[in-house]
Image (cartoon, helix red, strand yellow):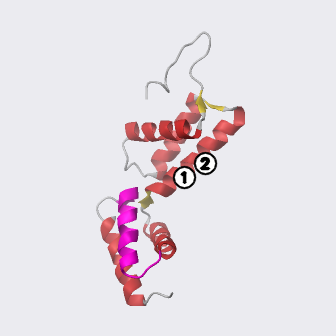
Amino acid sequence: MQVSEPVKKQFVEYVMLQVFDDQYMDRQEEKKILEEGIRKGISVQEGLSIIRQLASEKDFVIEREAEERIEEVLRQFALNDGVVDKKEFEDALALFNSACKGKVPEPELKKRLKKMMLDKGWKAKEGTFFKKSKWFSAI
């Protein structure tokens, strides 16, 4: 079903209002926005399409998409040798921070990366035989 231009324009304005203060759309905001779109007759797919287009044009962050990109980076690191070492983790952290445009504190980003790794069953390489480092456990 085609959505009328006035309804679409109103939805766009609603999206922009939600990200106005911090230029960051977390998962809860995204769900709230999509629910509002449904009330206006906009499908979830169309709502997501509008949100992605606006994020690209207006340069705001969609948390879910930033996390999906970083999860793929971690997957590649883990596929390489079966583990994610400290440097790879720090590289992923830097990319994650960049993708979030600094809107999420680094300790929170580290926790999210660790959770991604644990949820996917990816291992962390902590230290060597001679040099014990518990960087992953410390998060």
Q: Which residues are magenta?
A: 23-43
Point 45% across, 87% down: residue: 3
Q: What label sits on residue 68 in the rendered view?
A: 1
Residue 66, given in percent of the width and then of the height, sits at 50, 53
Residue 131, given in percent of the width and then of the height, sits at 57, 12
Extreme residue toward the right, this view: 80
Marks 1,2: beta carbons within 8 A: yes
Extreme residue toward the top, this view: 130
Point 56% across, 29% down: residue: 86
| Residue 15 picture quarter | bottom left
User: What kind of element bears circle 2?
Assistant: helix
State the residue position of label 2: 72
Q: CA distance from mark 1 to mark 2?
A: 6 Å
**What's the amino acid at mark 2?**
Glu
Q: Is residue 36 magenta?
A: yes
User: What kind of element bears circle 1?
Assistant: helix
Residue 12 shown left or right of residue 85 in the figure: left
**What's the amino acid at mark 1?**
Glu
Q: Nearer the viewer, residue 74 or 98?
A: 74
